[in-house]
Amino acid sequence: MTVKWEWDNTLDEKLYEIREYLHKNPELSFEEYNTHKYICQCLDDWEIPYEKMFNTGIIVDIWGGSGEGKHIALRADIDALPIEEKSGVPFTSNNEGVMHACGHDGHTTILLGAVYHLWKYKSNMKGLVRCIFQPGEEAEGAAKEMIDLGVLENPDIESVVALHLWPKLPLGSIGIKTGAVTASCDDFELEVYGEGGHAARPQEATDAISIGNNIINYMKDMQTKWFNPVKPLLIHVGKIEGGNAINSVADKMKIEGTIRTTSNEIRKQMKERFISQVTNVVKAYNGDVKIDYYEGHPPVINDISNTEVLEQSASEIIGHSNIYDLGEPSLGADDFGYFSAQISSTYFRLGIIEENQPVYDLHHPKFYFNKEVIPLGSKILTQYAINMLK
């Protein structure tokens, strides 16, 4: 069955208005109370029912009126970042030190545009489209919390799609790939203990800084020698603290960093080896260590068949020449990985590069995107949902 639908051009200005409001009023992870209220108001204005979930999350279930069918989901993140905005746009952030520097205002608006049209044409569809407005992506991953609360159940959701604005592709194009798209993100904190003393008599002390340096050097072997070198693995130390005086031997050193990989197998093995090998290095130098290893987001793994439907749907909207193969995965992370770990998923990039215009990366205080990409994103999500529910 072919479902005929048309984009309502009169909605464009409303979507631009929504984007500007969200951008002017950004809220941090798990504090998106006004954002939540505003999204609900938009849905109320369109007379579209919804369900509140996990404090600031929102679920919109759109049931097709043509009988039983697949159960799919679309997801957008709604939170902002602790960044002072320097974009200079007329609708700059009203909240000091908080900014939509990752495009989540765009993601939210794009999903609202899709909700509007899927609701309008629901009588011609079969099955269910569950639209998920998710808080807390920039924090510890509200995706997992919402999954634990049953966002993929009652009824069971079979597949899910999300997008992310991407300042590395031309405006209005998309980037896709199958397999790994983003990496897992695990963090570590090491507190290395030695025995303090005078720098003039190092033989009478155990230098925690020296031990820490040996751990950091050994991490190079962890990264390059332990696993298949053609599979991405990143170990990065981003913070070091140690010592109190230039003429003292430090009795403590703190090391903090992150570990990224696109392989669930490597991720599991890495945790076990990291803890055991760091412990062995410290013991070899007569020190002690406290290891805190935090498991964060899983990698996002795109399903082949689901991604093929997304690619076909996008080609119907923007033409196949505007679809790019992402090639390599990103070692950035997204808590959409929790969805990916549960059901068939696709995560794609929506390009925002404009010719002869400066481009700023995600999380930059001057990050900006042209509003014209919003209807395109909404159309792609809408076409995907309709194609999946044929």
Image (tube, rainbow, N blue to C red):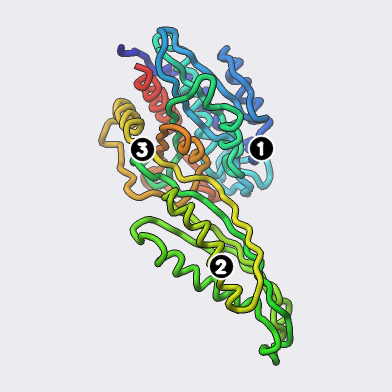
Q: Residues within 10 Å of mark 3 (few under 14, many from 20)?
A: many
Classify mark 2: helix, strand or loop: helix
Residue at figure coordinates x 67%, y 30% from the top left: 55
Residue type, label 2? Val
Q: Residues within 10 Å of mark 1 (few under 14, many from 20)?
A: many
Classify mark 3: helix, strand or loop: strand
46 over 318 or under it: above or below? above
1 or 2: tag closer to the N-terminus: 1
200 over 266 or under it: above or below? below
Quick one: 255 or 343, which is closer to the camera?
343
Give the x, y percent position of residue 297.
Answer: 53, 45
Residue type, label 3? Ile
Residue at figure coordinates x 53%, y 41% from the top left: 335
2 or 3: tag closer to the N-terminus: 3
Distance between the alpha carbons at the discs numbered 1 and 3: 29 Å
Residue type, label 1? Phe
Question: Can you identify the residue that label 2 sits on?
Answer: 278
Q: Quadrant of residue 355?
A: top left
Q: Residues within 10 Å of mark 2 (few under 14, many from 20)?
A: many
Distance between the alpha carbons at the discs numbered 1 and 2: 35 Å
Quadrant in the picture for the C terminus: top left
259 over 4 or under it: above or below? below
Classify mark 1: helix, strand or loop: loop
Q: Does the residue at mark 2 contact the one at mark 3 (Cβ under 8 Å)? A: no
| Label 2 vs label 3, nearer the camera | 2
Question: Can you identify the residue that label 1 sits on?
Answer: 30
Report if residue 64 is visible in the image: yes
1 or 3: tag closer to the N-terminus: 1
Residue at figure coordinates x 44%, y 54% from the top left: 266
